[in-house]
Image (tube, helix red, strand yellow):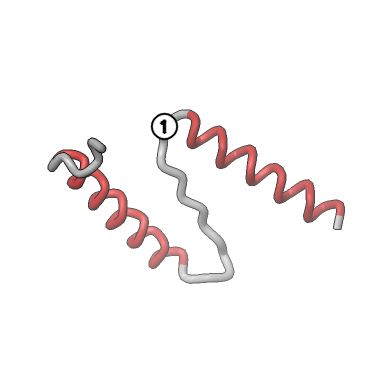
Amino acid sequence: QRYEGAAAEQRQRTAAAVRSAGADHLVLRSDRDWLLDVVRFVVSRRERVHARRAGWGAR
């Protein structure tokens, strides 16, 4: 349980650091189809970028 808590805390710190840098954060796992996760991430990011360019993000 101690290891689980330390690992969760490290993941939270990493995610916070990535967000504070303004970067997108993709978490991959080896127990699932990570290729599908990458595709979803790229599609989602493209949609966000296009929405910002179209003025959707300026609220």
Q: Where is residue 52 in the image (x, y as percent from the top left)?
A: 21, 40
Which element is circle 1 on?
A: loop
Quadrant where the C terminus is found in the figure = top left
Q: Is residue 29 above or below residue 27?
A: below
* Picture quadrant where residue 49 is located: top left
For image coordinates 42% across by 63% down, the residue present is 37
Q: In this view, does 1 lie above or below 14?
A: below
Q: Where is residue 28 in the image (x, y as percent from the top left)?
A: 51, 57
Which residue is farthest right?
A: 2
Which residue is farthest left?
A: 54
Which residue is farthest front?
A: 59
Q: In this view, does 28 lie to the left or right of 46?
A: right
Q: Position of residue 8 (x, y in %)?
A: 70, 50
Q: In this view, does 49 lie to the left or right of 29?
A: left
Quadrant where the N terminus is found in the figure = bottom right
Q: In this view, does 1 lie to the left or right of 10?
A: right
**Neighbourhood count class around disc 1 (C-alpha, 10 Å): few under 14, some 14–19, many 20 upward:** few
Q: Mark 1 points at which residue?
A: 22
Q: How many labels does the image show?
A: 1
For image coordinates 46% across by 50% down, the residue present is 26
What amino acid type is highlighted by mark number 1? Gly
Q: Is residue 9 above or below residue 38?
A: above
Q: Is residue 33 above or below residue 19?
A: below
Q: Which of 19 and 27 is in front in this view?
A: 19
